[in-house]
Amino acid sequence: MSNPVSNFFILLIIVLFSACANIKPPTGGPDDDSAAVVKKMLPKNNSVNFKGKTLTLYFNENVDASKLRETMIISPLTESQYDIITKKKVVTIRFRNEFKENTTYSINFGESIKDVTKGNYTKNLTLAFSTGPFIDSLFLKGQAYNFVKGGGIKDISIQLYSTSDTCTIKNSKPLYFAKTGASGNFTINNIKEGTYNVYALQDLNKNYLYDNEKENIAYLYDLRIDKETSKIKLGLTQSDTKAPEIINSKQEFEYYLLTINEGVETYLIKSDNNKIISDITENRKTIRLFNTFNSKDSITLYYQLTDSSGNITNNSTKVLFEEYKNKDKKNTFYIEVEPKNKQLIKNQKILLTFNKPIGKINHSLIKISKDTNTVDSTKLLLKSDSSDLTITIDNLSQFKDSITFSFQKGAFISLTGDSSLSLKNKFIYKKEENYGIIGGKVVCNEPYYILQLIDNKGKVIDSKINPTKFYYTWLEPGEYQLKVILDLNRNG
């Protein structure tokens, strides 16, 4: 008969061995969400007189650096090829050429190195060293925020490009780079003194390029970075990436009007076999085309439109000038004279603008008097521009007190046969002591703005885009307003 006590010990041993054969990790603890940490870098961060060609990073755990070549930014940019070797906890970057002498290099690794356990990327990893006796120590601090809603934005790419080269955010990686933190704040260290274009980019595809119209962006051009540089703010908005378009066209007697969906900076219209004469309205949204075609068929026009954001449209359209039934109803032929106040400063030109192309000038019907002396109008260099819509009268420096222009009826004949009406204008010299000056600086951290000078009647006298300084002379006595418009959609 077996011993009960012995059987109990045998059963206990079997249970113990069974328990030891199924080892399980302890439960209840949090997952390891922390990224790999750099324990040592060679060369050391901010070291000087570095003469090697190899950079080595030692981490606290095994890492994967397979994306390093895609995201690592070395500034200043180097043409040197390099090899990347990863062995467990060590990442080695071996350059094939020597670094430039007496140069500070700043390397931003981006989000390129991750631990192999959880795949968490090490963020804000940088290394700076100098091949000379000192290291560039300038820095740029600031904040990126939502221009419309306010509030800082995290994970925004802050990118610096030197104004002295052709690299832009649309075609190249930046010289210097940083990511914003939770409150939108950023710091870029080890910058060389100079002038830079600064961009804040919502880099959705993480390629450091502005190549997606859904990416919000802000920019600040020609920022001088030196010891006096202060903190900057960059307000991100969705940039205007849509090119202008012609949305309507119609004939209005002798004109053909092409309506554009937004104001344009420049335009160009061509035809295969016809001379094109055109002008554009003050709001830059309507092109006025004149009938110089002598054709009963439709004409193909090729046009290029460029808006203030640099968006360009190249397209074509057809126009057909039809003979209107009531020829008595047509646009009146008239002349506008500048300056309108009939006062000139020395060497200032007089501008005659016509609403129809000029076909003929009858000099015998034009009388010009300098002070009390009559002058042959042909000697005052009446110049018509290529559109035949403008005449510039210069060479006026010889008169002392006044100059008078008398245009009799028929002095100018339009291309469609209209005769100009009689017109007389007397111009006098301005006296400097009777006029004022306004000058100053514009301090604005927003990427795109317009400065306007406005008189007391609300008329815009002058408009400038992104000026840092302004200076207006020969202003009539009176009250003026300076207005800064923040152009959110950048359409001018």
Image: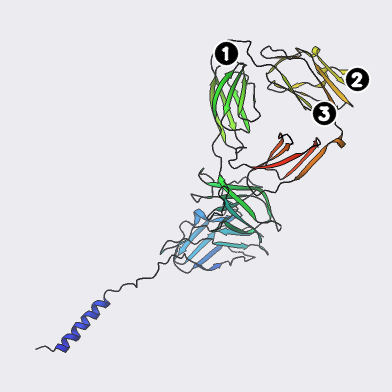
Q: Amino acid at mark 1?
A: Ser
Which quadrant of the view contains residue 259? Answer: top right
User: Which mark's residue is nearer the viewer, 1 or 2?
Assistant: 2
Secondary element type, mark 2: loop
Q: Nearer the viewer, residue 200 or 127?
A: 200
Disc 2 target residue? 372
Residue 348 visible in image? yes
Q: Position of residue 348 (x, y in %)?
A: 81, 29
Which quadrant of the view contains residue 306? Answer: top right
Q: Position of residue 276 (x, y in %)?
A: 62, 21
Color scheme of the displayed model: rainbow
Q: Residues within 10 Å of mark 1 (few under 14, many from 20)?
A: few
Q: Which mark is residue 343?
A: 3
Q: Which mark is residue 70?
A: none
Q: Is residue 171 above or below residue 107?
A: above
Which quadrant of the view contains residue 313? Answer: top right
Disc 2 to disc 3, C-alpha distance: 18 Å
Disc 1 target residue? 295
The answer to whether mark 3 and mark 1 are in CB contact below 8 A is: no
For image coordinates 56% across by 25% down, the residue present is: 302
Disc 3 to disc 1, C-alpha distance: 44 Å
Q: Nearer the viewer, residue 54 or 331?
A: 331
Q: Amino acid at mark 3?
A: Gln
Secondary element type, mark 1: loop
Left or right for 92, reference 447: left
